[in-house]
Amino acid sequence: MNHIALKMLMGDRGKYLGIVMGLTFASLIMTQQPAIFLGLMSRSYSFISDVGLPDIWVMDAKVQFVDDIKPLQDTELYRVRGISGVDWAMPMYKGLLKARLVDGTFQTCNVVGLDDATLIGGPPVMMEGKLEDLRRSDGIIVDVDGARDKLGKPSPTPGGKRISLKVGDSVELNDHRAIVVGIAKVTRTFQSQSVVYTTYSRAKSYAPKERKLLSFVLVKAKPGQDLAELTRRIRATTGLAAYTRGEFISLTYEYFMHNTGIPINFGISVLLGFIVGAAIAGQTFYNCTLENLRQFGVLKAMGASNWVLLRMILLQAVLVGTIGYGLGVGLTALFGYSMRHSILAFKFPWQLLLFSGAGVSLICVFAALISILKVIRLEPAIVFKG
Amino acid sequence: MQVKYTLPILAVTGFLFASYTVVSSNKPIPVAPAIAPPASAPFKSFIAGAGIVEPKGRNIAIGTPLSGIVKTVAVKVGDKVNAGMPLFYLDDRDTHAELTVKLADLAKAKASANEALASLKDTQSLSDLAEAVTDRRAISSEELLRRRNALLINAAKLDSAKALVQQAEAALANTQTTLARLIVQAPIDCEVLQVNIRPGEFAQAGALNTPLLVLGNMDQLHVRVDIDENDAWRFDKNSKAVAFLRGNQHFKTDLILAYVEPYVIPKKSLTGDSTEQVDTRVLQALYSFDRKQLPVYVGQQMDVFIEAKDYPGNNGSPL
């Protein structure tokens, strides 16, 4: 019976390809668009996830997301340090400063100041130089994307590619001299500004004169300390906001979810993919069944039960669904792979495989259902009509 | 036939590639390690503060009583000096010239005094002669009166000349004091920590942002710890305290409280802004420690932890 089902399906090559194409297209849209969406959203909190060492971030109570800096007084660091359950607490400066390049153009960069002694919160991967080199005078570490592109030197030929910043080059940060001592790889941020790492005290001297400059206090809990309990204690004693890394990530994520149009835009794309996929695949599949209605009638007349026919249609649906799904996710992965060095945001977690799988299954179930209804209602006598 | 197998194979390949992408692209981001392990407190509940190392009796910012060009600097950084030893000399040429003038003035005043004395003697002898005449008719009363008055006038002139000598001597002493003040001396036995002037530079009298010289007693060092005023109530003079050297937590030392400055001062946050506002104040506690335990320099920062009472739960929140 299964063989007959496959024969029916693949007998008309054009229709078969049509169904598979429709499902592939639906699966591609339902995987690729959410992947871009997730990639974009993960960039909103990539700065937090890049800083792996601390457990808890302490900041002003009114901070809404990671780039919403409301600086604290320097003494707050010592107040946080004095709370029991805190293993260590380190200052971090984060702010946007203007960098003046060799050719006189200005670029806004994200300057991150790390604790002078421990340099906690540094970039995850160093491509050139060492993190310790920040101790050298006027030293900064630049992220590789920024060094290649935004902070790079102008091309000698007009319209050519910019020359990448190298270790030893100098940049002017807010009228202060800064020397590149290392190139780091960081996860791209939402605004894609180039990231400049330096020490906390140097960042303070680069930053415009303000009374408060401490952006975050990074806290490591003592081993065995309950993080929720510690964040509650920090909040109660200092009046500041304290979030675990996960909480801070979801705070930032939620801000972008609620305050930007990104989720709606991508949601509509995914929905359109689903509807178009369902329409094409469902209609073609139904057509295919209609064409083979006579065969189904013969089978029914020969005594095949409804259950057998239902299994046949389900087999057809599962087959085209699986093929379409496999091709769709494969194409998505290929798309992500070919774009891996570009500026495109792309994140492909395993949940997304399940999501698009569920979407394709839904389309197949829908397509199979209308076909099944038709076949079950079929009178065997139809074969002998006309 | 081809379509029959190609599509499923392609689909399986696609799914496998997608799975591979999922696995390979979602590797956890490596964690950047701390360059130096951060210091962590050995107490359960504690006050944390920043400490700065200073000599006992604090640093002495040497000033000059007179402004002037520096002629020579007699000490260099690291020299041990005793009280009264000269530190630097200011240009004294004009004062020396003045001294010569004053010496000449004194000589002149002395000569005038001698002259006045001679005149006095002269009028004295003339007067004596007149007084010695027994017959009053031999000398007119006018002449007698004139000689007596001349004697009185010359005596007064001598007094005046002597006063001028005294004045010249005082002026000389004044110039000599000025000369002595052009040599700046060490006030106590101590070590030279910083020299900010060089011969030929102008040394300004008065309180300066950059002191001309910094001296300090290096025999015993203190750590000055800033404690936030919000934490000051938790501070106990008898509790234990530990200091860690920045950059290497293995250098640590127990601290012994020397004294607490009873006046809570505004915290200095050096933003360099002229309209800087101060809104937090700090209690300063001074601790002494064994110098041999740490390779520490004056002016270096330390992370200090002082054992203290815990916050009394949530109700103790100041906010």
Image (tube, rainbow, N blue to C red):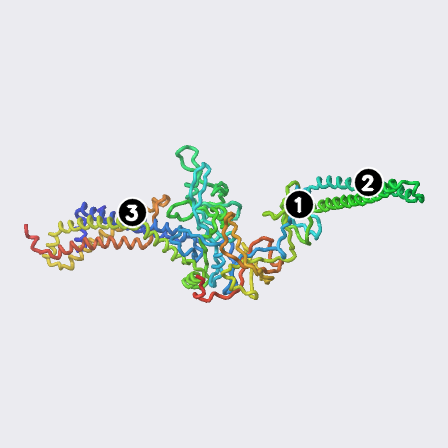
Which residue, as the protein is rendered here, is positioned at the far right? B135
Evaluate whether residue B11 shows in this view: no
In percent of width and height, residue B244 lies at 55, 58
Q: CA distance from mark 1 to mark 3?
A: 85 Å
Q: CA distance from mark 3 to mark 2?
A: 118 Å
Q: Chain of mark 3?
A: A
Q: Relative to A229, say whether B84 is above or below.
A: above
Q: Amino acid at mark 3?
A: Leu
Marks 1/3 in contact by CB < 8 Å: the verdict is no
**Label 1: how many Cα within 10 Å (few below 14, some 14–19, many 20+):** some
Give the residue pinned by disc 2: B111
**Label 3: how many Cα within 10 Å (few below 14, some 14–19, many 20+):** many
Give the residue pinned by disc 1: B66
Q: Chain of mark 1?
A: B
Q: Amino acid at mark 2?
A: Ala
Q: Relative to A29, say whether A80 is above or below.
A: below
Q: Check if mark 2 and mark 1 are on a common chain.
A: yes
- In depth, the one of A291 and B266 nearer the eye is B266
Which of label 2 and label 1 is nearer to you?
A: 2
Q: Horizontally, is B48 left or right of A57 in the view?
A: right
